Amino acid sequence: MVPAKQLLSTIESTLLGPSPPTPAQRIELMHAIHNSFSSFQSLLSYPPPKPSDRAQVQSKQVRLPDSSPISLDDQDVHIALKLSDDLYLNEIDCVSLIVSANQEWGLLGREPLEILRLASGLWYTERRNLLTALYTLLRAVVLDQGLEVDLVSDIQKYLEDLISAGLRQRLISLIKELNREEPAGQGGPHSELYVLDSRGALVERRAVVCRERLIIGHCLVLSILVVRISPKDVKDIFSELKDTAAELSGTAATLKQQITFSLLFSLVISFVSDALSAVPDKASILSCDVSFRHEFQEIVIAHGNDPNVEGFVDCIRLAWAVHLMLLQDGTVSSALSTDLKNICACLEVIFTNNVFQFLLDRILRSAAYHNDDEDMVYMYNAYLHKLITCFLSHPLARDKVKEAKDKAMSVLSPYRSGSHDRVHEGNLNSQQAIEPASLPFVSLLEFVSEIYQKEPELLAGNDVLWTFVNFAGEDHTSFQTLVAFLKMLSTLASSQEGASRVFDMLQSRTFRSVGWSTLFECLSIYEEKFKRSLQAAGAMLPEIQEGDAKALVGYLTVLQKVMEHGNPIERKNWFPDIEPFFKLLSYENVPPYLKGALRNTITTFIQVSPIFKDTIWSYLEQYDLPVVVGTNIGNSSQPMAAQSRPSVVGQIYDMRFELNEIEARRERYPSTLSFLNLLNALIAEERDVSDRGRRFIGVFRFIYDDVFGPFQQRAYADPYEKWQLIVACLQHFQMMLSMYDIKDEDIDSVFDQSQLSAVAQSAQLQMQLPVVELMKDFMSGKTVFRNIMSILTRGVNAIITERTTQVYGQLLEKAVQLSLEILILVFEKDVIVSDFWRPLYQPLDIILSQDHNQIVAFLEYVRYDFRPQIQQCSIRIMSILSSRMVELVQLLLKSNAANCLIEDYAACLELRSEECQIIENSREDSGILIMQLLIDNISRPAPNLTQLLLKFDLDTPIERTVLQPRFHYSCLKVILDMLDQYIKPDVNALLHEFGFQLLYELCLDPVTSGPTMDLLSSKKYHFFVKHLVTVGVAPLPKRNNTQALRISSLHQRAWLLKLLATELHACDISGSLHREACQSILAHIFGKDIIEDGIHSSTLQNGDEDSGAGSMSKSKVLELLEVVRFKSPDTYPKFSEAVRNLKYVSLVEGIIGNPTTSEKGGIYYYSERGDRLIDLASFRDKLWQKFNLISPQLGSFASEAELGEVRETIQHLLRWGWKYNKNLEEQAAQLHMLTGWSQIVEVTVSRRMSSFPNRSEILFQVLDVSLSTSASPDCSMKMAVILTQVALTCMAKLRDERFLCPIGLDSDSFTFLDMLMMKQLPNGACHSILFKLIMAILRQESSEALRRRQYALLLSYFQYSQNMVDPDVPTSVLKSLLLSEQEGEDLDLQKIHKEQAELARANFSIFRKEAQAVLDVVIKDATQGSESGKTVSLFVLDALICIDHDRFILNQLQSRGFLRSCFIRISNFSSQDGGRSLDSLQRACTLEAELVLLLRISHKYGKLGAQVLFSMGVLEHTSSCKAVNIHVKGSLMRVETKLGRDVAMDIDRQRMIVAPILRIVLSLTSLVDTSEFFEVKNKIVREVIDFVKGHQLLFDQILRENIPKAEDLTLEEINLVVGILCKIWPYEESDEYGFVQGLFGMMCALFPRDSENQRKSELKVFQLCFSLSSYLYFLVTKKFLRLQVSDVSTGYNVQQQPTLALLGSLLNSVTATLERACEEKSLLLNKIQDMNELSRQEVDEIISMCSRKECVSSSDNIQKRRYIAMMEMCQVAGNKDQLITLLLPLAENVLNILLIHLQDEETVEMITHGAKSDLEQDLPWLCGKLVPILERLELLSEDKTGHNLKVFRRLVNSLKELAIQNLAL
């Protein structure tokens, strides 16, 4: 058995959906209803209580069906037994109810009474769902809903079987049973009176049961139209009808009346349909049973005592008589049969009791009938139409009608004079309203009018009715029958066909005394009488006879309907002269109701033709009563000119007088009402708003002061008319506020008028603006404000009651809507002037806050569900107040209205989610407005409205809230249920979209994120994972028919993906809740196993999905991208060919080109999603304005052809605008989803990739598909930017992944080889990446921003492909480790290098195929792009040079002139480019990139590259560059300033400009050939020397740096300068610049260094020492420089030179450092090999020693720690090896210099010249120092150093021998 809720959902989605049901839906529907056959058959029949079950419950152990035994406590037992007693329900079922209530609501912590009511409400909800499901099925068969014929046939067959199985008998018995005072009905005497409904609201049980009876009654009516009724059912229904009708005596309960109507019409429809369905081969079911006919005739003809019951029985008598008539053959025989006698008997009673009047008064005109279900009312009217048609077609009935007509003509007075005493006219009207109504003929005419007034389409083809019209229209001798006939004619003219027929009928004088000529003749006669009386001195105005007045009203009503519904083209010519309707308006003796009819008729002509509007204005000014402003009549300020009027006691007879003196006495206001409606209709058609309503100030003041102002103090004979007046006033106010805006000049319009004279005040009044006066009224809380508040503060409950019980209920409803709309308009305008009008006028929210009850009153209208517009206004006001009033939530809490509002908003949202039809305009969707309200208030200070409506705990810090949506009924519960069930995805698409957005915004907000994410991560919802399947990868709707659904579906996926990304990014995975949620998300998205702490785990805890398995054909991350891989629709503002061929399109382009919004005179608006769309209404208005400016005749004198052409053009353009909007929305939605996809990929890649064992595979898949998509021609440029960013992230992660700690390896077996065997992509995958990346770069639609990302990706790829092993691990260390660990492994450096070379060749080969195109793009960006674009393009060229073969790239750069342009840009770099602005910094970056590119050429191509650069004048151009001078000036500034920012910028320039230039110069020195030492004309040497001389300040400045305190960058520059000088300065013969002395001074400062004190920078210092030693070696060998043993100079003029003792000190330092480096390197290599044997403490000590604590968290396992320690030790070992590699040649230089000095006898003599004693002391002393050092050098081993020391040792031995020899001297 299908649950009732699911059954109803299936039925509604299939039968009531916006689109035809799919085959799957049809199958699901039929399966569901067939499974529910027994539930329908035994409708609302439940197992009764049983003693055995009661005992089981009392035992506190209950076994429910299909579940294990459950235990109950005392409270559960008590509630279950109470439910059983109250509902007459089985005890076990009551326990099931409690369990269901707990699942739905959460019962923990609730009171027993609340639990009882919740369980009862749940039970009644299930019943209601079942009844509604049955009603929907019956409705689908009976009413034409456009469903497929075979589907309707299947349902009909099912219902026929169901009714044949006893359903109808069950319906009849239920109506009786549910009305009884017993537990199974309305409840026993001790039953609980209230239940809690599905939204948690307290509802009276009787009302719930009464509503069930009404639905059952409707089902009964519909069932009769499916299967004809049986005689027994007729008698049962008739009996129940009499019982139910008896209950109506003395009560006006709407539901009970509607139940009675359903029983009444069940019989009416039964009799009519049964008789009409009789055919020759299929007789009437009721007529076949002769005994039933005889028995029912006796029952129905029997007279009763209750007049109310008798009235309903009379209705059955009428239907029974018609039934009998239909069964006759239509002829009357001489001998009356029994049936004819029965018919006559019924007719006699019918006409005697005047059943038609009863039908009118008690049924058709009752509020209950008006407020019944629309479909049922239509059905009732349809069968009343058949009833009266059949009735009037039978001869007996026609004779009876003729008899009634003759009687009416003889009884009614043919003439009645109008009384001049206006006070008593109301009483006369009342009397006359009663007298003719008692006559059946008059009642019959009005009855026919009432039927077709509601359903005019039933008039089509109704010849019987028109025959009756011809009969009823003849020979009227009384005005009462004439008026009734004319009223019937007005109803018959309510359709186009009927209007034409009535017009022709009255035009052709079908009736002798009834025609249009009679109307105009009568108007003319009275107009002449009034004129003559005015011309005669002292004559009184004549009286208009009452009969004539009433008849005129009848004629005018017919004319009004004829003009309203006539053919739009034909009706223009029907009444060309409308002046007669105006001529009687100004006369006092014309009855107000006649004036009202005249004005109502005039109003009708406004819509007929634009010509009539101006005509009406002119006639009104000429004839109608004036509206006086102030003490004098001012024609210029009136809407119509004032003429001389007859005065009454010295007072002018104007509208004010007529209202206050004439109509007020009668308590009826037809004239004023018609006047307001006429003026409102005219004003609504005004298009010229330039005067801002000043010409309507008279009407406004009249309405403001005399109509609306005192409306509460007036007496009204008819409350319907009262609310008509109020609605007319409110419509006028609304038009004034909506048509006219507040402008700047209105700001100064506020002043004190009390000091003005009377004349000045009157003049001032005439210059007022209605919109300004209304704003002042509201902003000071005056008349209009108070009256509107009096309407709204009646309360929503009172309005609902009056709406359902009073005839004027709909007018009251309209008044409430207009009041709320006016408040919204005031809210929109008050902020403009509030700051200037204070303190006299305050913003509306300040005025409202003076009485909190006012605010609560109109906020509660969200509960009003009869008219959605009222709900929407209430929600909009709530949105406005929430943005203005910070204390709004506190106000609602203090007023005790918060809980009700929470439930009301949730109920409104839930009701909207259950709708079955799509609401096209989202701005008129209550659900969307609520969602936007919630979203807008999220970020506002707590406590805010969103937190209130979502039931956050406002009594504690919001962050600590534990959300319980199942416990509290709120919008949060509705939203979660709506998204969880995901019902009606087409109808609720926008609701689902905003639901996901709301949850995302809640998770993003710092205050609400914690509670919301905890809730969504809980196992109750499985929110994240579930919607990946239901929403994320579901098929995307097609664009053709469901583009709006397609757009919303894309946005839903976008918000869902963003929500998932937020969970992955922000959640705390230390807790199991979020950890499991994250693992589940990752497993579903990427389709892989998750690894947690090194162990594979299936993350799907519920086991309902298999997507967590490691082997999936396609991961959802690729499926999600596949969803958005479609060509974006065209959104360019261009017209289609069909539109371009139209005539006026050139003018439209100006409208489209205006970017402003519709509020500021444009045509655009911003949708709820933020898309800028075309406002089609504004677009249409603008088009009409343009066309009217071009062709002014279009408005008045245009032909139909011209108007048709314009209309067609506008329709074409509007269709284009609609398509443009949809395409723009779809493109935005596509980008939005792609953004969400990119976020979840990037978050996963950057933060959660460690959870996957095969990370490289996942990264490659995402990278590959991102590049493929971005290179596709269907991919838009915006999409390509997003996809390239994702590819960048994946590429960066791939680079990291190769050298991260491998996952899944046993920590005990982790070795260094595991580091090398990383997740390296196959070469084929690398080739694919590069090829697709190149295709993406060459895509047709591109931009510099996109290419910058693509270039960055290309650079990242080259870095990835060029390093197969970790670049931080030196090759020497790899060799050492591989030699010790290889042992049979097929892995060595040669193989790695070979694979590296193969990949590099393949990369170049792939690039070579598209090289020309790629270089075109890159070089263009490098020369013409922005500075940032130039920079990255230059880096790309740098990378291409790295993979160049056969100097292809170099040749291309030369042949294209690119290198030459680079040199020019370098030389043109000015001092202004070195400023401190961002642009200057970007230009400096570009310069750096150019220099780096030149340096790369020199490095890549060696001497050839340097020769190319040199030949192109690189030194000349770099010398012209002002960057070096900027560096010098910046350095001086750095000394003077203390601002850190200046220092940082100078250092950046030093790094970006100076260092690269020095590197280039140094690279050129490689061209210096030492064999040409004596050739002074060496060009390279000369130019480098000239460069040095030209930048002497730079070189001097760098040489003077304090080396011990210098930073790394400064040390590098010192090395570069020293390298350059050491290379070329020996060729300089003079030392006028002092560089030699500077170098010598640096030697003296560095050589005696203490290596232990400068461990940090020792590598760079030793590099400097090496350069200096090489320079010194060059001088010693080439220039024969000889050094002293020690410094013995005493004079100041002697140049400082290094000494042999200084070299000995340097050698000692080098030796010590070598020994230490070798030992540390050996120790590190040993530790690396024994890493798996180290304890955690030892590993942590290594990490701490390397200062890498930030890389390790406390949760990291030993495996990751060992890996980090191993990598750090490899890097340190590599640094030591690099140091050793540098120190060995440095030592060799020093040894060679010493060896030369000790070997050369002349040197010894020079040393000892003039001071033998010094030699004796210094040389032995030097040798004595050298011997121990040399002995230590001899002990260096090749194993520890990693180098061949054969030559080195020979050198050491030679020097040692000489040293020993010198010691022996």
Image: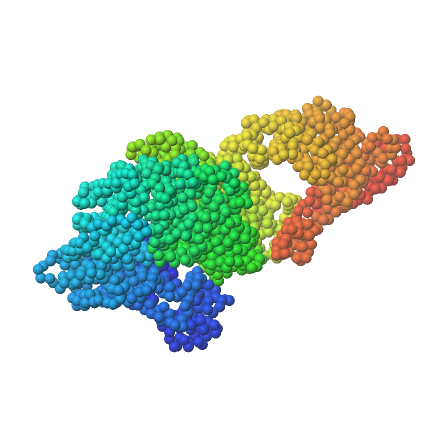
Query: Along the line of sight, which residue is nearer the eye, 1604 or 1196?
Result: 1196
Q: Is residue 1228 visible?
A: no
Extreme-top residue of the structure: 1577
Q: How is the image coloured?
A: rainbow
Q: Residue at x 46, y 50 (%)?
A: 786
- Assign the C terminus to one quadrant of the image: top right
Q: Is residue 1372 visible?
A: yes
Q: Specify the quadrant of the image occupied by residue 1814.
A: top right
Q: Residue at x 25, y 62 (%)?
A: 311
User: How many numbered marks appear?
Assistant: 0
As displayed, is residue 92 above or below residue 474? Answer: below
From the viewer's perspective, tell me whether residue 53 is left or right of residue 547: right
Residue 263 position within the rendered picture, expressed as x and y whole percent measured from the top left: 28, 62
Q: Residue at x 40, y 45 (%)?
A: 703
From the viewer's perspective, tell me whether residue 382 is left or right of residue 1436: left
Residue 1750 position within the rendered picture, expressed as x and y whole percent measured from the top left: 65, 51
Query: Along the line of sight, which residue is nearer the eye, 537 or 184?
Result: 537
Q: Residue at x 42, y 46 (%)?
A: 705
Extreme-front residue of the structure: 538
Query: Along the line of sight, which residue is nearer the eye, 1674 or 780?
Result: 780
As displayed, is residue 765 above or below residue 709? Answer: above
Residue 282 position within the rendered picture, expressed as x and y whole percent measured from the top left: 17, 59
- Assign the N terminus to one quadrant of the image: bottom left
From the viewer's perspective, tell me whether residue 194 is left or right of residue 945: left
Query: Along the line of sight, which residue is nearer the eye, 865 or 1618?
Result: 865
Residue 847 position within the rendered picture, expressed as x and y whole percent measured from the top left: 51, 49
As displayed, is residue 584 above or below residue 1083? Answer: above
